[in-house]
Amino acid sequence: MNRLRILWSAIILMVALMISGTTSLMAAPFSGRTTFADPRFAAVWTRTDGEAVRGGRTWYWGPGPWFDYGEFYRQSPNSARTVQYFDKARMEINNPAEGIVTNGLLVKELISGRMQLGDDPYDVSYREGSDVPVAGNPRAANTIAPGYRDFAGIATIDNGYRDPSRLNQRVNTVISRSGNLSVRDDLAKPETTIVQYNSVTGHNIPKVFWDFMNQRGRVMENGRIVTAPIVDWLFAMGYPITDPYWTRAVVGDTERDVLVQLFERRVLTYTPDNPAGYQVEMGNVGQHYFQWRYPHLGTPWAAPDPVTPLIYASNIDTGSYWELYRANFNGGGQRLTFNNGETVAFSWRRSWDPAQQYLIVDSRRNSPTYRQIYALNAIAADAGERAPGAGVLRISYSNNDGAFPPPDNDYSTTPGSEYNAMVSPDGNLMVFVSERTGAPQLYLRRLNIPLRGFAQQITSYDPACTVETPTWSPDGRSLFWVTNCEGNFEIYRADVRYYYIDTLYAGVEPVNIRNLTNNAANDRFARVSPDGKLVAFGSDRDGNWEIYVMNADGSNVRRLTNHPATDDGPTWSPDSNRLAFASDRDGDFEIYILNVSDGVITQQVTQNAAQDRWPLWAQ
């Protein structure tokens, strides 16, 4: 490792220049996403929403978590804080040493479009305010309800806006989707009488919401069920940042009148038509914020987990170069690519919205000499590139073929290959190998669809070194890759320190780099399991190439295959219990599946006279 120098000296300058909207970092969204990311989150949720205390009352957080993540926050370790999303809100731990669970100011961000990056109130990035409806169905089925940004003119968002006290008055003001206000006296119901005026932010609270905010009931405290205030409303909701307003919203299949009030952290809704006990509810702010911050990830609270079929490369139809196939598990596969240029798949950009799921490949389709990176949409269908809606997005432009990208992209005028592109778990970042400076190096870039932005070189090896097959940990906090600088291949791991991330650029530094294998043999093709516990790899340490696994810290190495043939290129199943790999044990390379627990081969996926290699499953 004495030849490795980490390049990040230009980051500070780049940070000063970046002013566009930030996006999130690091996630474990596809493995154990419905379990609590931290026991302190579980304790907060259990206090109000656990089965032992909730009974028939409305949710304060939601039925359970559905997405945990390490989002950029400047004061957290490596600028990544642990967060977990629920229907109604997001929990977060900014400083693990303190262990304090907080509840983000999501509503302020949704209204203003200013996403907070750190403790400094001016440490923000900018994007459009959210048009997600504050109440009712999603926008596609709810065109009439106002979105969060429609409240910008009547909300206290660091602008000094205040409403006058309206104590003892009833709420009869309606806000439309465009933000226009009107009056309907028929809505001035007794329960909407203003009973509190918050002098901190200058907003009125009606009786129906004040009663809910101060409601007592069964809660879990220190392992015992007691009767107490159900929530500390200032912790759970923050201060009110608007007055209450009536809206029209489509709820289910019915258009209804809904009273809404926006607080710093939550939204309260009152729907008179709802059953008793559910007339006042916490709005689905967690869902709303997630749609705004991660528009490419779909709706994990409502959709099944993404399907990532087993893909492999084969020359069965070409005789010479690789095309991609989808395994059908009965001895063959369905051809997916028809581009007359070598194509190998390396990772998925997964999404709970199938239309936004991409297969990331490197291919020679634009050049017989240089490999370039592409994102293939809707390609996993049986018809592949010939399927309706299938598309090919070119990401890499390092071969100087004249097909230059838009002006804000980076490209090289020195021809070279780019390959082994691995997408971060949240789909926002991509680490890849590039030869744009001559020697292969690791680069990192934002992955925008459509593509925009800049790539950052994150390693600087001597030209004699080889760098290959980067892979993310499922929580996005670590990178693994393979190098050969001293005559053999070794597997390395590094933590990722973030300095900045926005819509065009990510500034990172690999830190705490360590050699996980550190022996005289060759160890290659490292892949981290979806649950983050194990690393699968190929090694010739016992005389020929076999499949091994080790713990993510390099300990407890286990050999899974034992055959005189070559076994290599492992890839994990979605449940982390199986591996697909390539082996030439029948005379040519075929794809096999084995159990990780005992190394037993359970299936031969392909069986032909061609070469079937480089499987990709859940990564």
Image: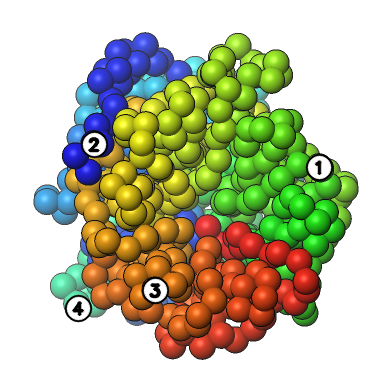
The Cα atoms of the two marked residues, 4 and 1, are separated by 64 Å
Callout 2 secondary element:
loop
Looking at the image, tell me whether mark 3 or mark 1 is earlier in sequence order.
1
Residue 413 vertical position relative to residue 586 in the rendered view, above or below: above
Q: Do the numbered discs 4 and 1 sit on residues whose CB atoms are within 8 Å?
A: no
The kind of residue tagged 2 is Arg
Looking at the image, tell me whether mark 4 or mark 2 is earlier in sequence order.
2
Across and down, in percent, residue 488 comes to 34, 54
Task: Compare residues 513 and 563 and report the one nearer the observer.
Answer: 563
Q: Which disc is residue 233 wearing?
A: none
Q: Which disc is residue 3 wearing?
A: 2
Across and down, in percent, residue 139 comes to 68, 40
The Cα atoms of the two marked residues, 3 and 1, are separated by 38 Å
Residue assigned mark 3: 543
Q: Quadrant of the N terminus?
A: top left
The kind of residue tagged 4 is Arg
Callout 4 secondary element:
strand
Residue assigned mark 1: 339
Q: Do the numbered discs 1 and 2 sit on residues whose CB atoms are within 8 Å?
A: no
The kind of residue tagged 1 is Asn
Residue at 37 percent of width and 31 percent of height: 463
Looking at the image, tell me whether mark 3 or mark 2 is earlier in sequence order.
2
- Residue 106 shows up from this direction: no
Task: Compare residues 132 and 256 and report the one nearer the observer.
Answer: 132
Determine whether, in the image, residue 104 is placed left or right of residue 401.
left
Across and down, in percent, residue 509 comes to 28, 34
Looking at the image, tell me whether mark 4 or mark 1 is earlier in sequence order.
4
Query: Is disc 4 surrounded by few (<14), some (14 to 19) or many (20+) residues within 10 Å?
Result: few
Residue 501 vertical position relative to residue 489 in the rendered view, above or below: above
